[in-house]
């Protein structure tokens, strides 16, 4: 009885946090109802990345003929779901556990208001050995994408143009099983110039996710601590 009571209390607290808006806006696809109210539950672990795009940051590819920029995430174990969100401009304050790009550090204090309409794409890469991250790799497939999400805070213009996606694992389908490895987050914009700060968040059920703007940098984070 005590165990059930503790579980019920824990679920109620998680649901209350969801309903009150505390914690990351990115929530999982799992929902739970308490007192007749249904809400999405948080992921067990979150990893944040703060970046800033200006003329010094060169596009790394194209997506539907638009300039695209890349982030790379190392997921150290198989997961049941990956969630990704991107908000611009960044509104949170980086903590010691967050990953912060030097361009963000150099520019955000002087320009915290410039933002862009985010569009994000999640790709699975063919890199599963952490010792070989620096050797590079290729995208095996696009898993999912998102443009506008009403679940995230609106941008300063009052539009729901920030992005959120979720991808669940299918262990019966090798192309949809979310295994250990590197995942690429591409981002671009179809409504505005890509300029300003952003906060990218990855949610999973495992600790140890790391995010970087290059495979070389990700290799160092994963293998050199």
Image (tube, grey):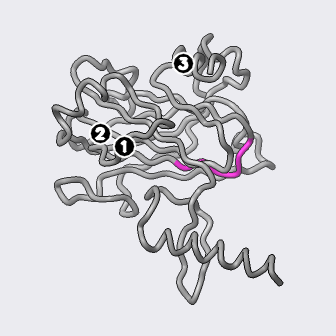
- Between the residue at mark 2 and the residue at mark 1, the CA separation in whole angstroms equals 5 Å
Report which residue position mark 2 lands on: 189
Q: Which mark is residue 201?
A: none
Q: Residues within 10 Å of mark 1 (few under 14, many from 20)?
A: many
Extreme residue in the top direction:
135
CB atoms of marks 2 and 1 within 8 Å? yes
Residue 115 screen position, x and y as percent: 22, 41
Residue at 63% from the left image edge and 54% from the top image edge: 44
Residue at 70% from the left image edge and 21% from the top image edge: 130
Q: Earlier in the sequence, mark 3 or mark 2?
A: 2
Residue at 73% from the left image edge and 38% from the top image edge: 77
Report which residue position mark 3 lands on: 215
Q: Which mark is residue 119?
A: 1
| Camera-nearest residue between 181 and 138 | 181
| Camera-nearest residue between 139 and 89 | 89
Q: Is residue 217 above or below residue 111?
A: above
Q: Is residue 168 above or below residue 14?
A: above
How many tags in the picture?
A: 3
Q: Secondary structure at mark 1?
A: strand
Magenta span of residues: 78-83
- Between the residue at mark 3 and the residue at mark 1, the CA separation in whole angstroms equals 21 Å
């Amino acid at each position: 009885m005590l165990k059930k009571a503790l579980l019920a209390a824990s679920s109620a607290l998680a649901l209350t946090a969801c309903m009150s808006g505390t914690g990351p806006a990115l929530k999982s696809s799992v929902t739970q109802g308490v007192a007749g109210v249904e809400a999405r539950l948080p992921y067990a672990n979150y990893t944040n990345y703060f970046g800033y795009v200006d003329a010094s940051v060169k596009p790394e590819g194209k997506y539907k003929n638009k300039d695209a920029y890349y982030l790379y995430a190392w997921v150290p174990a198989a997961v049941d779901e990956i969630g990704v969100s991107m908000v611009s401009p960044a509104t949170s304050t980086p903590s010691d556990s967050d990953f912060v790009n030097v361009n963000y550090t150099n520019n955000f204090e002087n320009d915290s208001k410039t933002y862009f309409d985010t569009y994000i794409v999640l790709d699975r890469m063919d890199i599963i050995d952490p010792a070989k991250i620096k050797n590079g790799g290729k995208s095996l497939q696009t898993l999912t994408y998102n443009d506008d999400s009403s679940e995230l805070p609106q941008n300063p213009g009052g539009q729901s143009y920030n992005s959120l996606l979720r991808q669940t694992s299918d262990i019966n389908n090798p192309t949809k099983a979310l295994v250990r490895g590197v995942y690429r987050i591409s981002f671009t914009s179809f409504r505005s110039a890509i300029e300003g700060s952003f906060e990218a968040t990855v949610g999973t059920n495992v600790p140890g996710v790391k995010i970087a703007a290059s495979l070389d940098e990700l290799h160092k984070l994963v293998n050199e601590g």
